[in-house]
Amino acid sequence: MKAIVAVVFAVLAGFTLPAAAQDKFTLQLNWFHLADHSPIYMALKKGYYKEENIDLTVLRGSGSADSAKKIDLKQGDLGISDAPTVLTAISKGADLRMVAVVFDKAGNNAFFKKSANIRSPKDLVGKKIAAPPADSHRVLWPAFAAINKLDPNAVTLVNVKPEGKQAIVAAGEVDASFDLYTSYAIWEKVLGKGNVGHLLWADYGLPIYGHTYFVNRELEKKNPKLIERFLRATHKGWRDAQANPREAIDAMAASVPGLDSESLFNTTPQIMDLCITERSRQHGIGWIEKDLMQRTIDITFAQNKPDRPVNVDDVFTNAYSSKIKPLK
């Protein structure tokens, strides 16, 4: 009997259970890799997704509208997009819900040469402004103009490919271009340091949410714990990226060939300005305030009525809300 027991223990001593298979999870970015995506790579580097048993795939995006479309079509698990674009998609029947906010205030912005003599929204009157056809700035421009008592038709909007925004301003073909505030360092690289002027719409009466994380509701029904685990790991990445933005940018650059890590690092002050607010300090990274989401809905559809009603209680949830507070 002792011999049998000894054999059993010998077998068990050399036997290890196979590791549990990790859950595959696909994140659909809103655009090519920018500094606000670096916390994801910080979380990858630190092993936070592995700790949550997640095998993460990150896909480059082609714009917020495309990101919303792909998640609605279940071609990814979670997407990044600005709140107005997600709301517009929902109004057209997309089965989406926002589960965390990235930019606690919107990064909608106008860039121009300092020599353009633009100092406030009223100085945009009569100007030619570049903006891609499906850009969120075009959706929000009528509301922003109304807030600032401007005729939205008092500017000429010029179609441009997203990657051509800086070049068309540098060439003097337009007076300004709508682009996210987080692109500041890219504009400096093209126009030169000290030559970039900008108007951040949040500073001129546009109180709305910016980029958010959102999912297809079917995933919520099937596997809410997977969403919770992804966000827990990601929020840790945001915490660490705030503490060491250089390390976060370097982690992303190591995974994505061809990135201009210095320019991306130089945009981190703008990223943190949009992400870290009194709300996020009080409630934690990613938390969504109902009243501000309602204002975001109201402004999004102020000039263009939704195809179907959009109820604030249906478009977001704080069920996965982070308890991670930003650093002081």
Image: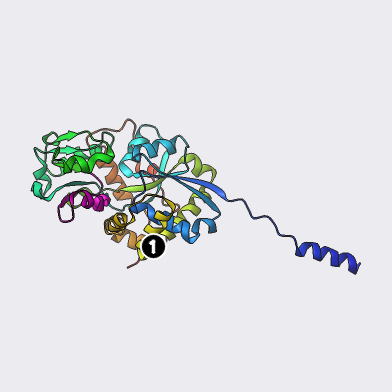
Three-letter residue code for mark 1: Glu
Q: Quadrant of residue 278?
A: bottom left
Looking at the rendering, the stretch of residues picked out in magenta corresponds to: 179-199
> Could you say where residue 231 lies in the image, as x and y percent from the top left?
45, 53
Q: Which residue corresponds to mark 1?
A: 247
Residue 19 in view: yes
Left or right: 139 with respect to 219?
A: left
Left or right: 318 with respect to 159?
A: right
**Residue ID at (29%, 50%):** 292
Residue 196 lies in the magenta stretch: yes
Farthest residue, direction right: 1
Q: Nearer the viewer, residue 13 or 239?
A: 13
> Could you say where residue 182 lies in the image, as x and y percent from the top left?
27, 51
Q: Quadrant of residue 18?
A: bottom right
Circle 1 Cα neighbour tier, 10 Å, few/some/many (<14 / 14–19 / ≥20): some
**Quarter placement of the N terminus:** bottom right
Q: Nearer the viewer, residue 202 or 238?
A: 238
Look at the numbered disc 1 and give the secondary structure of its residue: helix
**Quarter placement of the C terminus:** bottom left
> Could you say where residue 302 lies in the image, as x and y percent from the top left?
23, 37
Q: Is residue 48 above or below residue 120?
A: below
Q: Nearer the viewer, residue 144 or 249?
A: 249
Residue 177 lies in the magenta stretch: no
> Could you say where residue 256 lies in the image, as x and y percent from the top left?
41, 50
Residue 235 in view: no
**Residue ID at (42%, 55%):** 254
